[in-house]
Image (cartoon, rainbow, N blue to C red):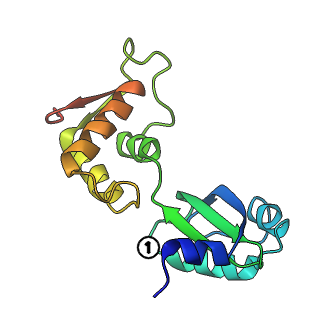
Amino acid sequence: MSTLKEILTRRPVSATIRLTVPAGEAKPAPPVGPALGQYRLNLMAFCKDFNARTQKYKKSTPMAVTITAFKDNTFEFTVKSPSVTWYLKKAAGIESGSGRPGHVVATTLSLKHVYEIAKVKQSDPYCQYMSLESICKSIIGTANSMGIKVVKELED
């Protein structure tokens, strides 16, 4: 059995590429084509694989993807769920947050919305070891910085 260090030394990394690609819509055209093409990576293989991994998301949902390109023209990639700000804007039904957060409230959301977003974000590689409570606190902080007020329950 080889250690992680041995595996990493066998395949030297040529680049780490970060992109935001709409779910299920990766094509060899810009922004994907030029970013991967300069490292001579197989564009069609990436597009096919990415689209297969993101098919459970609604089309055009912005997905953050980190691609590790190796010197032997192979690659690996990880896909993260959409950003918290994207989820908050969707849940609130707004295009952008407040221009003056802390002074002007753009809209309000319930704790139920925050909890649902936290459950989705918990599957992210960076959040998998965080408690649901700490993810919720982080989301509430993001909401506050966008001028979105989080309340216990929405009033009709």
Q: Check the picture and name the quadrant holding the N terminus.
A: bottom left
Would residue 97 appear left or right of 133 to someone viewing this image? right
The residue closer to the viewer here, 1 or 15, is: 1
Figure label count: 1
Vertical order, 127 against 88 (above or below)? below
The residue closer to the viewer here, 155 or 76, is: 76
Q: Crowdedness of circle 1 by 10 Å Cα count: few (<14), some, many (20+)? A: few
Q: Check the picture and name the quadrant holding the C terminus.
A: top left
Q: Residue furthest top?
A: 103
Q: Which kind of residue does numbered mark 1 sit on?
A: Lys
Which residue position holds label 1? 56
Would residue 41 appear left or right of 82 to someone viewing this image? right
Which x, y percent locates residue 149?
Answer: 29, 27
Which x, y percent locates residue 127?
Answer: 34, 54
Vertical order, 89 against 57 (above or below)? above
The residue lying at 45 percent from left, 41 percent from top is 85
| Mark 1 element type | loop
Vertical order, 18 against 147 (above or below)? below
Which x, y percent locates residue 75?
Answer: 67, 75
The residue lying at 38 percent from left, 11 percent from top is 103
The residue lying at 45 percent from left, 59 percent from top is 81
